[in-house]
Image: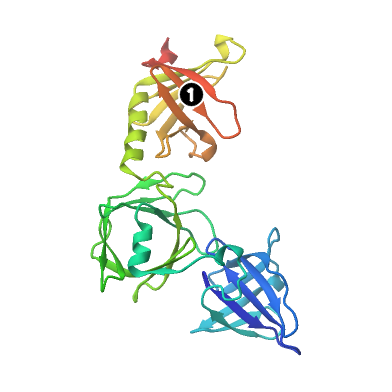
Amino acid sequence: MIGNTIVYSRPGPGSRQTGVFLHLDGTGWAAVRSDSQASAAQAIRWASYSNGTLCVTGTGNEPRLNHCGALSIRGTRVTLAPASGPVWSGRVLEGDPWQLDPGSRSSQRRDGRDAIRALVGNTLVFIPYGGGREYRAQLFLADGTVRSAHNDRPDFDHWALRPDERWSIGGNGDRLCLNGGAWTEELCTTLSITGDLVTLGHARVGPLHGLILQGDARNLSHAAEARAARLADALAGKSILLKAADRQAATDSIMFFRPDGSGLARWHEGAPKPTKWLVRLDGKLCVTEQRLEFRNEDCAALSIDGNAVTLASLGRPIIPGTLLNGNALQR
């Protein structure tokens, strides 16, 4: 279904057909056509479930029972059985032939070697069908290296690097081949790109879809990794003093960073608490209490210039601080 159009007819008089174009992230477009007229394309949201149910509704709406039906696909033939009422029949059309998605009208499909070349220098991310958290990212470098990372925390955008892989062009010059890293044997797949949708195809694995992002969109490069490591090294064994706006020393905040990722922190007038910390690949410092899980709200962009420190979060004022040697909470 992804990147293609489902066209189906409701039982009854007339020749009305509904066309639905589905994006990987759970969005899409839909329109109704008949012999005499066609509606404008409307933005939709969709979701599919493990029991084979497909739900389609307008943006901003929660799916209701009458928005859902049991979906069955055999080749290009489709049936959609609502919870009540007769079955709708239809077919799958490749791509966006109804031109429902404004963004796809100028998107030219690239296949094989041309598509592989389009990956080089860019990032491929995978998300669950119907949208959700990105769980895997791959940066394809011109030297044949693939920088791979996983993101498996439910409430925290943290990319954990995996061993590098290698990519090459195989088959008759039309296959993307991956080996090394977590692969026990070489995997070669077909590859096509339409807009930002990437489709990988393998006889055993089946189709797999991802999104192509420009450049090092998830900070997987060696340079990003080295920058994060330098920031972490600069903090290890030291403290950050954040001066209170009211200039009262009793309300200053102090964070102490042990090299093993643990630490201590006193925020304003509270007592020191055990903490844990890390520097993400995007250069953000994350600090939370030892007993808690990291959240994105616990992170701020870190900048260090000599002993001067700044922490910056989106929508908040920049917080200046001072880097101090040792554990400043013991002074």
Give the quadrant of residue 86.
Answer: bottom right
Name the one closer to the observer, 209 or 194: 194
Q: Position of residue 308 (x, y in %)?
A: 44, 18
Write the residue at 60% across / 66% down: 101
Q: Is residue 178 left or right of residue 295?
A: left
In the image, residue 70 lies at what x, y percent? 60, 78
Figure check: 12 above or below 23: below
Locate residue 186, reporting x and y percent: 24, 65
On the rendered image, what quadrant is the C terminus found in? top left
Q: Residue at x 32, y 67 (%)?
A: 113
The color scheme shown is rainbow
Dot 1: what SS? strand
* Count of marks placed on residues: 1
Residue 169 against residue 299 in the figure, above or below: below
Q: Residue at x 26, y 74 (%)?
A: 172
Residue most toward the front?
106
Residue 11 location in percent, x, y?
71, 87
Corner quadrant of residue 82: bottom right
Q: Which residue is mark 1?
A: 310
Along the horizontal axis of the image, is 47 left or right of 12?
left
Tell me if residue 132 comes above or below residue 111 in the rendering: above
**Looking at numbered disc 1 in the image, what kind of residue is underneath it?**
Thr
Horizontal side of 253 relative to 182 (left or right) equals right
Q: Quadrant of residue 239?
A: top left
Neighbourhood count class around disc 1 (C-alpha, 10 Å): few under 14, some 14–19, many 20 upward:
some
The residue under the point 45% across, 61% down is: 210
